[in-house]
Image (cartoon, helix red, strand yellow):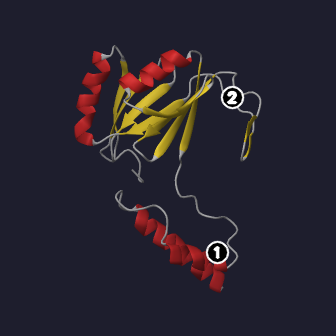
Amino acid sequence: MKRRKLYAAYLLEIRQMTSSRHRCLTPNPAARQRWRDHKHVRPVLQDLKETCLYVDDMDRAKAFYQKVMGLMPLVEDSRFCAFDVAAKHVLLIFVRGASMEGSELPGGTIPPHDGSGPIHAGFAVDTDELTAWESHLAAHGVDILSRVSWPRGGRSVYFRDPDGHLLELLTPGVWRTY
């Protein structure tokens, strides 16, 4: 019974935190530890840090993400490029098929991975910047495919990168959590 009450309190705290888009989604450390102390088997995720896209032409993709999206490379080689996104996230661009074998690093092995087809990634922007982004995309010859106004007040603009991946610029109010 005590475990059920702790879990209910934990869920209530999460609901209260997610009711405001400006609050952190992770419960405070004390609440997290109280739940773990009672044999909670799933640790709490903190964030999503990496998104990976697979491209056919690395030079073309790097040019697009640097010139159009304004991202700066963190590290790169002939098969991949890691871009900094707002000093919080990493966008990984891999040449399609180039990561089909594991990568041996001094600290361990990265298992093989790859992907095909158009993938979706969304980038957060301030509401007052969305119009400037639309003008910026137009100036770079990027066609806007769709605009969506969401019930919570957020707005989205959809377009494609040179490899056909569907990219989205989204403002606060699209999700309950953003």
Q: In front here: 52 or 148? A: 52
Inspect the image, locate mark 1, and give the three-letter code of the amino acid beneath it: Arg
Residue at position x 43%, y 21% in the image = 64
Q: In front here: 108 or 125? A: 108
Q: Which mark is residue 36?
A: 1
Residue 163 seen: no
Dot 2 crowding, Cα within 10 Å, few <14, some 14–19, many 20+: some
Residue 125 seen: yes
Who comes first in sequence, dot 1 or dot 2?
A: 1
Residue at position x 46%, y 61% in the image = 25
State the quadrant of the N terminus: bottom right
Camera-near label (1 vs 2) is: 2
Q: Position of residue 135 (x, y in %)?
A: 25, 23
Q: Which mark is residue 58?
A: none
Q: Pointer 1 and pointer 2: residues touching (CB < 8 Å)?
A: no
Query: In the shown orientation, is residue 117 left or right of residue 72?
Result: right
Q: Position of residue 17 (x, y in %)?
A: 42, 66
Measure the alpha-carbon separation of dots 1 and 2.
35 Å
Q: Position of residue 160 (x, y in %)?
A: 45, 21
Inspect the image, locate mark 2, and give the three-letter code of the amino acid beneath it: Asp
Q: Is residue 96 above or below residue 70?
A: above
Q: What secondary structure is found at the residue carrying circle 1?
A: helix
Q: Position of residue 127 (x, y in %)?
A: 26, 41
Q: In front here: 88 or 121? A: 88
> What residue is pinned by disc 2?
114
Residue at position x 51%, y 24% in the image = 165
Q: Classify residue 22 by image quadrant.
A: bottom left
Dot 1 crowding, Cα within 10 Å, few <14, some 14–19, many 20+: some
